[in-house]
């Protein structure tokens, strides 16, 4: 199956960034001259995803105004739709709320993470209901890590102070719609849906190399300016 849809989680409040996100959703913060969200849309388009679905929440009106004022879809040769959660629902709840607009299988990307690998390599073909793009970090003491058994995610390991290196969730996923809750409510993809899929043997993982950064804290947001500079 060749996936064409890329959904982007763009509803987080970004509280760790303080005043920067008081009136601006985190994915709309400027990075190297344009909103971070546009960098993600452009990358999705480069890898052949021509249908973008934005899962918005916190200050969603800023995203809607931007899309109305700028020819973002035409600029990148994609169609763009937006799903706005009626209240904070968490990452899994945002997916459940948008379920009717999601394809049977699709790529999902965190709206505050840049992981520069070939997204198409993760998207096309999988024996699992969900697959994670994994990134190796050292040291790994600040992160929950992932252990693989072949191509299957065997377990999630809590943060450990003595962990020299490990695999972490890179914020890019291939998901089947069957993995998404049908009931709309507050649900976390990371702490509820993915662990349940792991326990059922339905979660895969692949390790990719490439530049990785999460703009959710001031230090990494500052580093992203040079990382994504033209």
Image: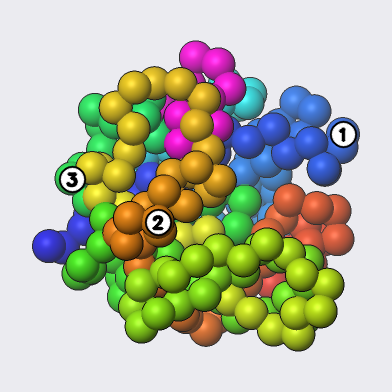
Residue 19 is marked as 1
Q: Is residue 86 magenta?
A: yes
SS category of the residue bearing label 3: loop
Q: Earlier in the sequence, mark 2 or mark 3?
A: 3
Residue sitting farthest toward the front: 199
The quarter of the picture where residue 129 lies is bottom left
Residue drawn where x is 26% and y is 38% of the image: 102
* Residue identified by numbered label 2: 199
**Label 1 crowd (10 A; few <14 / some 14-19 / many >=20):** few
Label 2 SS: helix
Locate residue 148: give its quadrant. bottom left
Disc 1, disc 2: CB below 8 Å?
no
Nearer to me, 205 or 199: 199
Query: Which numbered mark, 1 or 2, is in the foreground of this view?
Result: 2
In this rendering, the answer to whether 97 lies above or below 27 is above
Q: Is residue 9 shown to the viewer in this render?
A: no
Locate the C terminus and report the quarter of the image it occupies. Answer: bottom right
Can the viewer see residue 17 in this picture? yes
Foreground label between 2 and 3: 2
Tag count: 3
Judge from the rendering whether residue 155 lies leftward or rightward of residue 16; answer left or right. left
Q: Mark 3, mark 1: which one is toward the viewer?
A: 3
Q: What are the residue bounds of the magenta stretch? A: 81-93
Res 182 → quadrant: top left
Q: Is residue 192 left or right of residue 224?
A: left
Return the residue at label 3.
Answer: 104
Q: Secondary structure at mark 1?
A: helix
Mark nearer the N terminus (1 vs 2): 1
Q: Residue at x 58, y 22 (%)?
A: 88
């Amino acid at each position: 199956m060749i996936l064409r849809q890329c959904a982007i989680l763009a509803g987080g409040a970004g509280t760790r960034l303080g005043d920067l996100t008081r009136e601006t959703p985190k994915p709309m913060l400027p990075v190297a001259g344009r909103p971070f969200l546009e960098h993600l849309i452009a990358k999705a388009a480069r890898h052949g995803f021509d249908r973008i679905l934005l899962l918005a929440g916190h200050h969603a009106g800023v995203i809607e105004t931007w899309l109305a004022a700028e020819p973002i879809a035409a600029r990148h040769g994609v169609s763009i739709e937006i799903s706005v959660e009626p209240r904070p629902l968490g990452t899994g709840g945002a997916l459940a709320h948008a379920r009717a607009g999601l394809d049977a299988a699709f790529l999902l990307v965190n709206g505050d993470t840049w992981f520069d690998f070939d997204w198409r390599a993760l998207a096309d073909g999988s024996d699992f209901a969900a697959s994670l793009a994994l990134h190796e970090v050292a040291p790994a003491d600040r992160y929950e890590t992932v252990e693989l058994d072949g191509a299957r995610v065997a377990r999630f390991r809590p943060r450990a102070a003595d962990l020299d290196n490990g695999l972490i969730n890179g914020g890019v996923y291939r998901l089947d719609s069957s993995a998404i809750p049908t009931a709309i409510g507050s649900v976390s993809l990371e702490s509820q849906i993915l662990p349940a899929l792991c326990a059922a043997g339905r979660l895969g993982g692949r390790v990719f190399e490439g530049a990785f950064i999460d703009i959710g804290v001031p230090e990494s947001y500052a580093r992203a300016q040079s990382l994504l500079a033209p």
